[in-house]
Image (cartoon, rainbow, N blue to C red):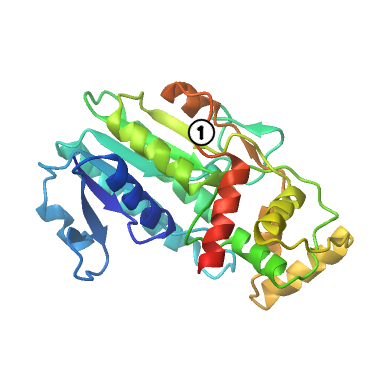
Amino acid sequence: MKILVTGATGFIGTNLLPYLRQHITGVEFLCLTRKKTGKPGELLWEELAQRHFDDVDGVIHMAGLAHDTKKALDDSAYYKVNYELTKLLYDYYLKSNARKFIYVSSVKAVADSVDGVLSEDVHPTPVTAYGKSKLQAEDYIRQLSLGVNRKSFYILRPCMVHGPGNKGNLNLLYKFAVKGLPYPLGAYNNSRSFLSVENFCYVCHQLLIRDIQSGVYNLSDDEPMSVKDLFGVIGKAIGRKAPMLNIPKPLVAAMAGIGTTLKLPFNTERLNKLTENYVVSNAKIKAALSVDKFPVSVTDGIERTIASFQNN
């Protein structure tokens, strides 16, 4: 099996490719990149038009412009990267002999906040340029797939992904805990979904090797977790229980606002991600795969992520 991949050097890509090598005998990768590094299987985006994918079995499109917590990017940048590149790649896929196209979108293509549980039936109302550009790409894939036979598409909407190499919100909480700093968000009692990168890899593997119905699928771990419980898991993993402060929410919000102004790691965007209620259902993808639960529990996944921070 040969797979055309974008985003191979990103956080998810550096976890996914080794996973697929381990689970698919003889798998080969053709990695689209902006700049070659000398590694085998690299292909510049500019060279895309010269290839017809005659020997490619599937495409995994992970490359994209990530959510900008520092608010430094222009809206047009999201459109150019997240929509235009997806459009270009999907056009080539439809002309190729490849049979499967996996597009990594985001739950933010549907909703910036969630009241209850987010399922695939919720009408998309993205708020940010990031979410809107992801939804545009999704719509393009769905529209062009109408009437297309013998080709499958899978639009994956992961929630907050974590794992080895991740430098996001969990890493920030880990730094708080490992330094023995008091946890400042004790006043928040939220419930949100996470996604272990191992569970993400498991889904991609199953989609590649099995005949699964095309469609849109939310991805999350089986159980949500509160940010308080999350900090507790982190403390247990490092063997240090940090104190928890119940700082009034308005004061925390003001501190995050200062962080936004000064472009600090703790800012309003990150505060919202950590403390919002954002529960995502994974029932549809589990039903499609005929499984009752994902391989990695939310607690085990977070513990493995923290262990990767300690090893680095």
Q: Residue 133: x and y, percent?
A: 46, 50
Q: Quadrant of residue 206?
A: top left
Q: How many other residues sit within 10 Å of disc 1, few (<14), some (14-19) or many (≥20)? A: some
In the picture, measured across the screen, residue 112 lies left or right of residue 64, that is right
In the picture, measured across the screen, residue 22 lies left or right of residue 198, that is left
Q: Residue 113: x and y, percent?
A: 67, 44
- Identify the residue under disc 1: 294
- Pick the front one: 211 or 95: 211
In the picture, measured across the screen, residue 250 lies left or right of residue 56, that is right
**Residue at 88%, 62% in the rendered image:** 247
Query: Where's the N terminus, which quadrant?
Result: top left
**Residue at 24%, 26% in the rendered image:** 148
- Pick the front one: 215 or 36: 36
Q: Is residue 25 above or below residue 209?
A: below
Q: Quadrant of residue 213?
A: top left
Q: Amino acid at mark 1?
A: Phe
Count up the numbered dots: 1
Tag 1 secondary structure: loop
Q: Residue 51: x and y, percent?
A: 11, 51
